Amino acid sequence: MPDIWSEALHELEPRLDKQTFDMWLRPIRLSGVEGDLLELHAPNRFLKEWFETHYLDLALDELEARHERRFAVKIEVVEDLELPARDADERANGRAAAAQVEPTPAPRREYAPAPAPALRRQPQPPVGLHPRYRFGTFIKGACNELAASAAMAAADEPGTRFNPLFIYGGVGLGKTHLLHGVGHELHRKDPSMRIVLLSAEQFMNEFVTAVRNNEFDEFRTRYRRDCDCLLIDDVQFIAGRDRTMDEFFHVFNALYESGKQIVVTADRVPADMAGMEERLTSRLNWGLVADVQAPDLETRIAIVQAKAERDGIPLRSDVALAIAELVPSNVRELEGALLRITAFAELRGAAIDAEFVRAVLGKGVAGERSPLTIDTIQKAVAGFYSVRISDLKGKRRHRGISRPRMIAMYLCRQLTKASFPEIGMRFGGKDHSTVINACKRIEALQADDDDLRSAVESLRDQLNAA
Ligand code: ADP
Ligand code: MG
């Protein structure tokens, strides 16, 4: 049986070019496992260090994706490692290890450090790409369509149409996933492309370290010259950090002027980032600004089904619906819910049906504050104005009803993560534009209608205290 390390390598192999894989990953062998610690052997120090700085994270991410936990590694240099089998197909055929490997003594030359110029010319696979965050595993829906399409277009024709591409939205809605998707796709199409992907926080740390260690020239080369595409996650992090913002500004200009693609994610639009320099926010607005919103019910169902399929969990459609209904907010929570359900099902040997899902997810949230639902808001507003819930969902335009209806829609938008289309659906199948108008209307009316404002405020307080 292949060990967990070989399995992970086997998975990584098709994603890297053959030369890279044979040179830097294949020679690393597992020598032992102790809990979460993998003990690895490398044939020489140079290979060990190169592997650690360039491919270790990739391998750890792959292991984490497969085993749902983070491993640590200890790499030892063991000079006379035998070469592992070269023929992956043979391995796949499951022949006995002894039969596959003609124990050839490792020709040392093969792993000796290549001369520096040759190395520089070698394509550098991007470091830190999450193995699972690819376009192929991203589910598009109304909530993220613009951002996803723009990300794909940016990867298709980098530096041309959407530059910079700025993706923003709440937590767990797929921003990082799309950012890595761009990296994967660019690398797939052109392995020689120098893709730099990191969080704004890492950018700051590297910058600070470079300044402290007098390595600013290297830093500048890495980001301004040796970079064909810059992917920066959570840029809001550098707001208010003047020197980092300043440096990022120069990096941005250098890359932008030479037509390099820049993709940036953040939790809000550029204008709302307090402490962000104006010259930077204006540049972030130059290209396309696209949002990701909380997934509507249909997208949530599609996501649950896709994740279950990926993990080989058979899931009936009524079960997927039950999960999607019970977890209304973000995709990360949706993944967590699916994990909890399968874990419980395995523990109890129970079949996964809608009833089981309700029992597990119902219990799981007890103790935590459960998020406000559209139902709760409708009930509260109906009670407050003494109208029926069916009126809120109905079509009557009488002011005594349309006002509470608009307020309820507005509160749903404010207090839940539901999207406009979803709110519309839950108010008797209304169009999303009706909901948008209602929200705008209530917002505008509150400015000079004190009664309305205090009604909305007391409803909000009542709901928040519930
Ligand atoms: P963010 O960066 O917006 O906080 P992430 O990109 O980290 O969110 O997404 C959280 C989790 O949800 C990840 O595991 C990601 O793969 C998954 N995810 C988010 N949106 C989608 C989607 N539309 N389709 C598939 N998976 C998604
Ligand atoms: Mg993120």
Image: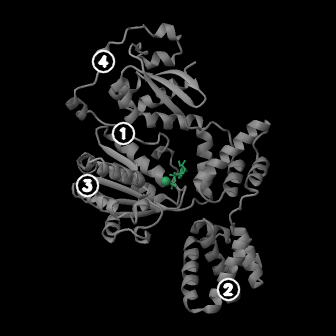
* Quarter of the view holding residue 326: bottom right
Q: Rate crowding at label 4 as few (under 14), some (14 to 19) or many (20 or more) other CA atoms within 10 Å.
A: few
At 26% from the left and 48% from the top, the residue drawn is 214
Q: Nearer the viewer, residue 173 or 281?
A: 281
Q: Position of residue 281 (x, y in %)?
A: 35, 68
Q: Which residue is mark 3?
A: 255
Residue that mark 1 sits on = 188
Residue 411: x %, y % from top left: 64, 75
Residue behind mark 2: 455
Instruction: Tell which tag, 4 or 3, sits nearer the viewer.
Output: 4
Q: Quadrant of residue 115?
A: top left
Q: What kind of residue is marked 4?
A: Glu
Sequence-first disc among 1 and 4? 4
The N terminus appears in which quarter of the rendering?
Answer: top right
Residue bearing the label numbered 4 = 110
**257 vs 56: above or below:** below
Please state which amino acid type lies under the numbered disc 1. Answer: Arg
Residue type at the position of mark 3: Leu
Q: Nearer the viewer, residue 338 or 296?
A: 338
Q: Nearer the viewer, residue 51 or 347?
A: 51
